[in-house]
Image (cartoon, helix red, strand yellow):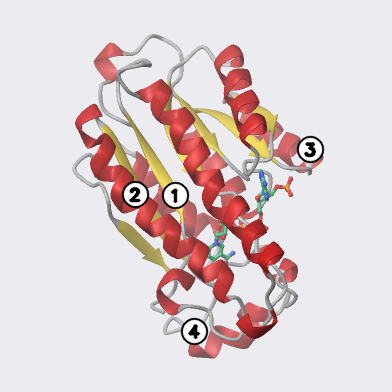
Amino acid sequence: MQGTQAKRTEANPVVLVTGASRGIGRATALAMAEQGYAVAVNYLSNGLAAQSVVSAIEARGGEARALQADVGDEASVKAMFRELDAHFDGPLMALVNNAGILLPQMKLVDMDAARVNHLLTQNVTSCFLCCREAIKRMGPDGHDMGGAIVNVSSAASRIGAPHEYIDYAATKGAVDTLTLGLSKEVAEHGIRVNAVRPGFIDTDIHAAGGEPGRIARLAPSIPLKRGGTPEEVANAIVWLLSDEASYVTGTFIDVAGGR
Ligand code: NAP
């Protein structure tokens, strides 16, 4: 867990995982509960899936609550953090900016401004808003015990995703830069900011991109010759949020099978 345990109350430290109803977010929420965190399980529209994550955590003796919010919408994010403050007794010590979307594959020449701006709002503005609200709570204006943030970027930020979704890749490039800048801005307050860059993970997101079988198509080109699991990404996130990574900030873990 994050440092400064001596200052803690009896209440469990809290982690907010955005987009935790499915995929990588779900696996991360379950893994953080195993570490003793109370988990705020954010989702956009799939309340049943979010509630199943809460039930799974509670069945193992953990603490969790589903929080509906559109993380791309400022009022919605503020309301989610207010609900988090009201519901959980423990301090917010960790944030995972996991929620993100893909749009159907197309070349840049066919993209319009509405599509690009929508992706920027959903994948980048969302991270800025959630980081801001978390830092207010972790820093000197909040409990002042510090904390840790992990942004879920993508291997696409390094590869560029030509012929598929350069717009998505560029939003993840922005997430990488946010991670670097913010890590230096808040380090003096004991807040660490890192990112994971998954690639080719078996979740619903590829169907949203218009190609549910994308991982099977690309597996031969991945050095490890297979796609990854949400749990394999969650393992890296849990480590970055833990005391084991107490001297790690402003850096990236690629979880992409060697691509
Ligand atoms: P996924 O299976 O499609 O799940 C997306 C999650 O995000 C769902 O919980 C969804 O909630 C939530 N969500 C979407 N828009 C939201 C919004 N505006 N506000 C709040 N929640 C929202 O996705 P995934 O594959 O696990 O991806 C998670 C993250 O990993 C994303 O940032 C993605 O870009 C990144 N990533 C994934 C891969 C991969 O291969 N899968 C690779 C690289 C990076 P609902 O259930 O309510 O819709």
- How many neighbours does mark 1 have within 10 angstroms: few (below 14), some (14-19), or many (20 or more)? many
Q: CA distance from mark 2 to mark 4?
A: 27 Å
Q: CA distance from mark 3 to mark 4?
A: 35 Å
Residue 259 in picture, x, y percent from top left: 41, 79
For marks 1 and 3 on the same chain, the one whose residue lies earlier in the sequence: 3
Eye-nearest disc, 4 or 1: 1
Q: Is residue 200 visible?
A: yes
Choose between 30 and 200: the one closer to the eye: 200
User: What label sits on residue 194 in the rendered view?
Assistant: 2
Q: Mark 2 belongs to which amino acid?
A: Asn
| Image point (57%, 70%), residue name | 167
For marks 4 and 1 on the same chain, the one whose residue lies earlier in the sequence: 1
Q: Mark 1 belongs to which amino acid?
A: Asn
Eye-nearest disc, 2 or 3: 2
Q: CA distance from mark 2 to mark 3?
A: 29 Å
**Picture quarter with ligand 1:** bottom right
Q: Is mark 3 within 8 Å of ligand 1?
A: yes
Tell whether 146 sits left or right of 223: left
- Kindly check if marks 1 and 3 are in contact, taking CB atoms under 8 A apart as contact: no
Up the image or down, 201 lies above or below 38; here it is below
Q: CA distance from mark 2 to mark 1?
A: 6 Å
Q: CA distance from mark 4 to mark 1?
A: 26 Å
Going by the picture, which residue comes out furthest to the top?
Answer: 9
Question: What residue is shown with label 1?
Answer: 151
Up the image or down, 219 lies above or below 39; here it is below
* Secondary structure category for the residue under label 1: strand
